[in-house]
Amino acid sequence: MTVVQDYSEDQLLLAKALSLCNDAVLDENFKATGEPTECALVNFAYKVGLNKNELQKVCYERVAEAPFDSIRKMMSTIHTDPDGKYVQFTKGAPDEILKVCTKALLKDGKIAPLTNELKEEILKKNQSLADSALRVLAGAFKHLEEIPTNVDSKAIENELIFIGLVGMIDPIRPEVKAAVAECNEAGIRPIMITGDHIDTAVAIAKELGIIKDKSQAITGSFLDSISEDAFAKDVQKYSVYARVQPEHKVRIVKAWQQLGKVTAMTGDGVNDAPAIKNADIGVGMGITGTDVTKNVADMVLADDNFATIVEAVAEGRRIYDNIKKAIQFLLASNLAEVIAIFVASLMNFTILKPAHLLWINLITDSFPAVGLGMEEAEDDIMKRPPRDKKEGVFANGLGTSCIIQGFIIALITIFAY
């Protein structure tokens, strides 16, 4: 994650606000460690000449905070300032930050009321950044005479001064777009669920090939406005969900399960854990994932790469195909033995001696079966639709095929004898 654009009349103040209202830290090698978004903000500040560690050490010591949560979509911290008083920095989703701002920072450090015209201008810039597939965050501040007795978000997040916006890019891995295309070809429906702005989500989803137009994307607030029955009926229309809460993720998983679909849910944060637990296959992230998420997941990606999931699906299909091939071979050959011996006994002659049976079962059955089990995948393995989860191993005529092949082998054996 990297900050690639900023929109502010005071870049240094914006960088200071976003790096101090932040839980990431710079190590001795000036490398940020922590949550990727927050690391990007700390690195942005460092690039414009601000070292977060030095700022906190010299004069901006954190004395209070209102942690981030996904409901209000912002966090606030209170720090000492060089004047011996206090300053509050707040960062979060631009639309939510604007709701708690009454003023804005203009050129030359002037502060003016946040008029509707100015707010509209900020929202247009936010839209422009989001349309460029950037994750957008806003920063705000206000001066305080003393530390509030009640450091509650409702008590302190008001009458703020808007500073500006930053646009961050999380580069899409080259292999992910190909993996999404492979999913579509294999009958697997990729669904994007994110806390980002809907325009950012739509831009990224279009680039990946998950959706073709914005009508396939909805927000968490829209989900709240429709009933369970209505959503279950229309769930197949949507492939992108933006600004969602943890309960929305669970609702999405259950809606697909009601249609009889097998769901796999990926995630790395604590907020993803309920949905991961409810999914048929929970997938945690090995690098960025929290311990809570890893513990509830059925599998953990060691490389945090979506393409690895697709590779795992292909490998699973190969293994299942090879199991069916081995079963078909063993059942057909053993059925042929039984039929041949039975017919021979009725005709009062011996077709297979004990030594022959040992040779067949230990050599001619075992090694080919092992070979079939290790066979490479068929060329069309990821071009088939997923099999029905209720489908047995003898479905699609496998049982009938075993019987027919067994009789044919037996008849040829008897005839040859």
Image (cartoon, rainbow, N blue to C red):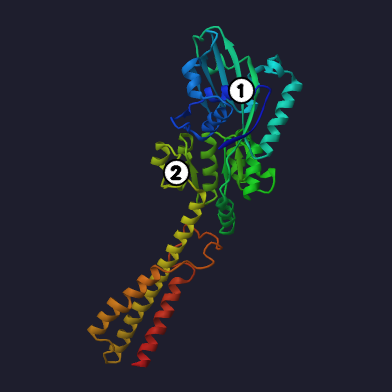
Q: In the rendering, at what x and y percent does residue 32 appear? A: 48, 32
Drawn side of residue 8 relative to residue 59, left or right: right
Q: CA distance from mark 1 to mark 2?
A: 37 Å
- Is the residue 277 above or below the residue 151 in the image? below
Q: Quadrant of the C terminus?
A: bottom left
Residue 19 found in image quarter: top right
Relative depth, front residue between 109 and 24: 109
Q: Mark 1 near mark 2, Cβ–Cβ under 8 Å?
A: no
Q: In the rendering, at what x and y percent does residue 23 appear? A: 48, 26
Q: In the rendering, at what x and y percent does residue 253 appear? A: 52, 43
Relative depth, front residue between 362 and 254: 362
Crowd tier of the residue under label 2, counting other residues whose Cα lies within 10 Å: few below 14, some 14–19, many 20 or above: many
Q: In the rendering, at what x and y percent does residue 96 appear? A: 62, 25
Drawn side of residue 30 relative to residue 209, left or right: left
* Three-letter code, disc 1: Leu
Q: Which label was assigned to residue 147? A: none
- Residue identified by numbered label 2: 284
Say which residue appears at 64% left-offset and 24% top-offset: 11
Q: Secondary structure at mark 1?
A: helix
Pick whichever of labels 1 and 2 is earlier in the sequence: 1
- Is the residue 287 above or below the residue 351 in the image? above
